[in-house]
Amino acid sequence: MDNSVADPIHKQNRAVLHSPKCDISLTIMAPTQKSKPASNPASSSAPTHEISNVTLHLSDPVDLEMQWVGRPELMSQVLAAWFQVHPDDFPLAPRLVGKPGVGKTTLAYAAGKAMDQEVYFFQATMDTRPEDLIVTPVVAEAGKLKYVASPLVTAMIRGGIVVVDEGNRMSEKSWASLAPLLDQRRYVESLVAGIRIPADGAFRFCATMNDDASTFDLPEYIHSRLQPQIFIDFPEADEERVILKYNLPYAPDQVVEYVVRFLQVAHHLGEPYTVRDGINVARYALKLMGAKRSIGGDTKDGPGSTSEETSAPQRKALTQAIRMILGEEATEHLDHRGD
Ligand SMILES: Nc1ncnc2c1ncn2[C@@H]1O[C@H](COP(=O)(O)OP(=O)(O)OP(=O)(O)O)[C@@H](O)[C@H]1O
Ligand SMILES: [Mg+2]
């Protein structure tokens, strides 16, 4: 059976490769032609790009207020992996590994922004198919097929950074389609569009992965392409304080200190609570206090208390927030000084 893309206009330029593994024909342009940018006549906000006479509709980069604070060595490790020491050298594709909520996505995005390039996210899931990662055909007007480039392929074309977030939720089959991109070949092949897509020289790749159990074990040939591994551990108290203050600049110092102490005890006891949990706890405690004040007019020792220690209402709100966000067992680690 020949499943190669039926395209009378481009067919003559194509070589057809038969894949014994999946019983389909892979149609690629031979040789790969230099791609050229094109503007989309329908909409200037949705750019297109032409490769071998196939028009790809590009995705949008993300622009977020997400900064990395503290632990500059982790940022340097990502940037070093992307560094090209010689024109013949090619960048590495680091994987950022750590518990949920330690800052993997934040670091990946901030490192991309530090390169002063467009950053694209691809959220990997168990249902991610190879074509979702590369090019998806969608039916447009008059029943015509329109080829939509994934954020990953858009980053490849535009010389941006892609973050494949939660990468080990994605199956080996999907990762396999990225194998040539992650070595010196630096291209992907779109089966549906019948084209080979080369990455721009400025393109950089990064994956984030949780080290929890709910994920796929990736095969060695994928792991060996996702190097180096950058492990993000729980931060030290000083760093945790800076991160909390950065994310909650309006939180009183006593509340931040209380949450830092709670997190540090939890880390030492091997509990999985992360800085994200700490941010959520502090945020919810402040809301509880704020709501109480606005409903009941209770202005004593509220969020703005000037005492160095947490006030009784602050501790009450923090305890309730910890119980509701992390569960009853988390309250065992609370600092009850002054109670
Ligand atoms: N160094 C840091 N600088 C700034 N914010 C940070 C830092 N580390 C963690 N955070 C904050 O912690 C929260 C969790 O971070 P993030 O979402 O990046 O974690 P993650 O490791 O990707 O989690 P998950 O595995 O669940 O996706 C975010 O609110 C983020 O802003
Ligand atoms: Mg994340």
Image (cartoon, grey):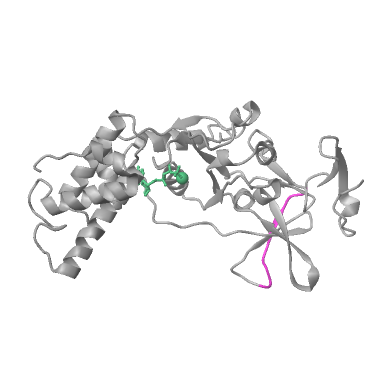
Please report the residue visible at 29 percent of the width from the left and 34 percent of the height from the top.
266
Most foreground residue, 30 or 213:
213
Q: Is residue 266 above or below residue 15?
A: above
State the residue in front, 241 or 199: 241
**Image quadrant, ligand 1:** top left
Q: Along the horizontal axis of the image, is 324 left or right of 335?
A: right
Q: Is residue 238 visible?
A: no
Magenta residues, start to end: 33-42
Residue at 63% across, 29% down: 219
Q: Position of residue 193 (x, y in %)?
A: 77, 53
When the figure is inspected, residue 293 is found, relative to residue 201, above or below; the finding is: below
Instruction: Kindly indicate the quadrant of the structure image that contains residue 47.
Output: bottom right
**On the rendered image, what quadrant is the C terminus found in?**
top left
Q: Residue at x 56, y 42 (%)?
A: 204
- Residue 280 drawn above or below residue 332: below
Image side of residue 331 versus residue 301, left or right: right
Residue 104's image quarter?
A: top left
